[in-house]
Image (spheres, helix red, strand yellow):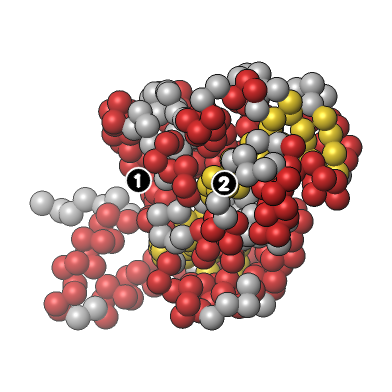
Amino acid sequence: MQLFAFGINHHTAPLGVREQVTFPENSMEHALHDLVGRNPIKEAAIVSTCNRTEVYCNTENPDVAMKWLADFHRLQALDLEPYLYKLPQEQAVKHAFRVASGLDSMVLGEPQILGQLKTAVKSAEHAGTLGLMLHKLFQRTFFVAKEVRTSTEIGTSSVSMAAAAARLAERIFGDIAEQRVLFIGAGEMIELCASHFAARKPKQITVANRTIERAEALSSRFNAQAISLSELPEHLATNDIVVTCTASPLPILGKGMIERAIKARKHRPIFVVDLAVPRDVESEVAELDDVFLYYVDDLAEIVKEGLDSRQNAVEHAETIIDTNVVDFMRWVSSRELVPTIRALRDQGERFRRHEMARASKQLANGEDPQKILESLSRGLTNKFLHIPSSTLNQSQADEREDMVELINQLYQLHRPQ
């Protein structure tokens, strides 16, 4: 078995590809059971966010795991292949550390990914697919992320996706104090966006969600109105800014709905930010006049602001990560010796039991205990030394010197001068 990671992210695949291989939270355990249950995979964990889908596994056959990703989403493996990165052993470890530390994010140093990784680990724990190897990997991953964030300034001046959305709205409308804002969804990303927009005191805030109770809970924090998704068509036209991020597998805002809203607005522009993967807004909406539509990838340039000033922090973080990769791989190497060490101890235990059985029988027959102890110790010594002595005697001339050196090292012997 070996540690292996693979996946796609915002560096390797466009949004249109990423949204085809996402795993909604409510299907994660099913996916993990399917992956481990039908393939030669000992352990597995899946990380699925708007910017990445990654699989971490302990397997002898990485190709089977990668084919599973395509099959599970009813895609052709060859279509997905150009976008996949494949990370064996040490590369997988370093990648996990960099991801958790915010070095591989669209927003350098953003803290959300750490929570998303922890959610992925919990899902794997609940599914029963997290074994010793991955448990150790992610525990060290969280340790490294904490060390990077406390020892460097990697998160200083980080512009989040939520903050970027608010900045972009200001660039389009200037002051958004006179604008009405509609949030679709009630998850963590929408909550962050609501905080940034609310700080700019827009004229009105509305929260739409499939579950009205969650919409009401969020809207109460920002003095907002709560509506259900079914009420969207009648409220869309009254809002100037729309920010959406749901877990819906299908678009919520179609071209027809937006067209009707634009007509009702008498062609006053509407600003739409879609942070969901898969997308909440049909791509055809971008063709409409008077609609400023931005998907998650479109915010990349804004969130890169301030990157140059954090390069020293990045270098420091990379040093911390490299050191921890070496330590973790040392642990992995030690685990590879476990079967050999266990076999050696099992053999020693068989020798011990055999000699103990013989000694017990001699004691029962009333033989001299001192002689029995002598015989016991001599028998154990002979058994332990027979195999290395015999192997050394039977070794070929060209390997004998190396074998002598190895035995001297194993038994801490000193050659006679």
Give the mark toward the camera: 2 or 1: 2
Residue plotted at (63% across, 77% down): 74
- Compared across the picture, whether 86 is left or right of 30 comes to left
Residue plotted at (69% across, 42% down): 265
Comparing 36 with 67, the one in front is 67
The disc placed on residue 326 is: 1
Label pair 2/1, CB-CB below 8 angstroms? no
Residue 270 pos. (x, y %)? 61, 41
Residue neighbourhood size for the residue with mark 2, other residues' Cα within 10 Å, grouped as few (<14), some (14–19), many (≥20): some
- Compared across the picture, whether 234 is left or right of 342 comes to right
- Compared across the picture, whether 278 is left or right of 151 comes to right
Above or below — where is 187 with respect to 4? above
- Compared across the picture, whether 19 is left or right of 248 comes to left
For residue 187, what is the image quadrant? top right
The disc placed on residue 290 is: 2
Q: CA distance from mark 2 to mark 1?
A: 54 Å
For residue 204, what is the image quadrant? top right
Residue 183 pos. (x, y %)? 71, 38
Residue 399 pos. (x, y %)? 19, 74
Above or below — where is 301 with respect to 47? above
For residue 180, what is the image quadrant? top right
